[in-house]
Image (cartoon, grey):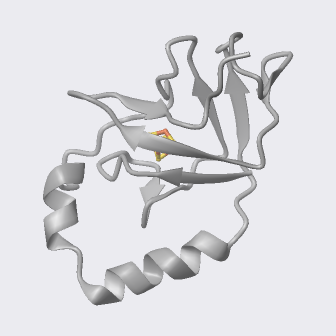
Amino acid sequence: MEISCKKTNCVHNKNNHCAAKEILVGSDLDCKTFKIDSSKPSPATNMLKRSLYEIGEIEKNFVEKDNIDVACNAKHCVFNKEGVCSANGISILSGKKKSAFCATSIKK
Ligand code: SF4
């Protein structure tokens, strides 16, 4: 599964992609695998600092296939199949304060 992620100050984030082997999305849709890397700029600051080279890297990475397992506790989501996400790919967005949340979830 491919995971696009805007939480650029997470230790697992590489060019707006998740590089973790597996993640857990909670019942509140928050990514429970998120771990802050204080050496990385916050998502808002990062947007301002992007160079054209970095944007090219993001586009290149977007077509690469990730192989990440997504465990999910959001039982209300149509993609949740017995605790595992069955979507082809998901988008994780940067939430308020320190959270990162799944924006792909659709209510049954
Ligand atoms: S916030 Fe979650 S989805 Fe995003 S890079 Fe970190 S672990 Fe991966």
Q: Residue at x 78, y 49 (%)?
A: 88
Q: Position of residue 103 (x, y in %)?
A: 51, 36
30 vs 44, left or right, is: right
> What x and y, as percent, mark residue 107?
66, 18
Identity of the residue drawn at 49% across and 29% down: 31
Please state if 36 lies on the left or on the right of 61 as rendered: left
Q: 41 or 95, which is in the foreground?
A: 95
Q: Quadrant of residue 69?
A: top right
Q: Which residue occupies 56% across, 74% down?
A: 61
Which is nearer the eye, 76 or 22?
A: 76
Left or right of 17 on screen, residue 89: right
Query: In the displayed image of the protein, which residue is found farthest to the right?
Result: 82
Identify whether 1 is placed above or below 70.
below
User: How many marks are shown on the rendered structure?
Assistant: 0
Q: Quadrant of residue 98?
A: top left
Residue 53 drawn at (x, y percent): 33, 89
Work out whether 85 lies above or below 38: above
- Quadrant position of the C terminus in the picture: top right
Left or right, 14 with respect to 81, comes to left
Taking depth in this image into account, of 78 and 73 the one nearest to the observer is: 78
- What residue do we see at 64% from left, 15% from top? 74
